[in-house]
Image (cartoon, rainbow, N blue to C red):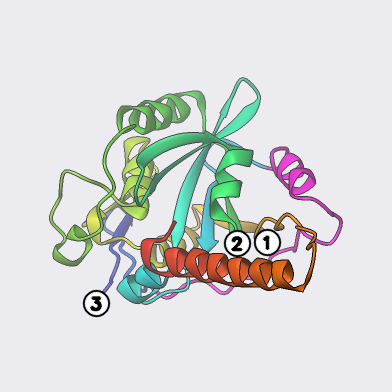
Amino acid sequence: MSLFLSIAVLASTPQATQRNDQPIQAVTPQMNANFTTFDQLADTLSTRVQTGTLLFSKGDCLAVRIFTQSAYTHVAMIVMRNGEPVVYDSMNGTGVRCLTLKNYLNTQRPATIHVFQPQAAFNQRMTAQYERFLDKKLGTPYSIKHHLTGNRAQGVHCAEYAVDALAACNLMKANAPSKVSPASLVTGIVQSERYIPSITFALERPPRAVEKPSGWCHQLWIDTKNCTSTCCIKLRGWVLCQ
């Protein structure tokens, strides 16, 4: 399956294209070492992002990994609003949505998050165009099937939503937006020198509440319940990407 991305940089060479969809293997600072809680990590990240920041996930979703032939499973976009970051993305089962940064990160657990920053800060005009497009698409259903055909559909997947938003503010464009994958988008934004890798951090699964057994039979029930729940959550992440 070919997942080639053709991205044209809107600069002095508008005909230049990028056809290598292999992810960029960049060495980026790790962010986890100094944080003991999820809230601390999320609060610190909120001070290190800006309008235009892209968040790429490497999660459990086998469906996307197989479909796109890549470890990157998702991409989301940040907008600063009243000094606080909000995150736009298109998620399976939900469609296009807007969440606070902390709530968004919570939906991605467990995953490794790769943060990419724009090479140059968005100016006022770009910011307005970017936000206008992102808001206009809120509520659009999620769809991935048209990724294979390259045709537009009623729904939109995460990378398609992202590259369309970048095109809306005249930063980049794709010849076939619906065929863009998170991995090919990473390659395009870095090799075109429009984005640089910033930080990488791992989000762990939320800790399970500890239930104290009243006896061996109760302990057996707790172990069985926890094992079943863990398997269901894992399968849901692999297959449904939720």
* Prevalent SS, magenta region: loop
**Residue 231 is one of the magenta-drawn residues:** no
- Badge 2 amino acid: Pro
89 with respect to 32 (left or right) = left
185 with respect to 155 (left or right) = right
Residue at 46% over, 34% down: 98
Q: Of marks 3 and 1, which one's residue comes earlier in the chain?
A: 3
Residue 50: quarter of image = top right
User: Residue tagged by mark 3?
Assistant: 2
Marks 2 and 3, how far apart in space?
28 Å
Discs 2/3, front? 2
Marks 1 and 2, how far apart in space?
5 Å
Residue at 50% over, 24% down: 124
Evaluate if marks 1 and 2 touch, with contact meaning CB atoms under 8 Å apart: yes
SS at circle 2? loop
Q: Nearer the viewer, residue 177 or 237?
A: 237
User: Residue tagged by mark 1?
Assistant: 204
User: Residue tagged by mark 2?
Assistant: 110
- Badge 1 amino acid: Glu
Q: Within 10 Å of the Cα at label 2, are there few (<14), some (14-19), or many (20+) other Cα atoms? A: some
In this rendering, the answer to whether 45 lies above or below 209 is: above
42 with respect to 91 (left or right) = right
SS at circle 1? loop
Q: Nearer the viewer, residue 227 or 127?
A: 227
Say whether residue 118 is visible: no
- What's drawn in magenta, residue-wise? 22-48
SS at circle 3? loop
107 with respect to 29 (left or right) = left
Discs 3/1, front? 1
Residue at 79% over, 68% down: 215
Question: Outermost residue toward the top?
Answer: 82
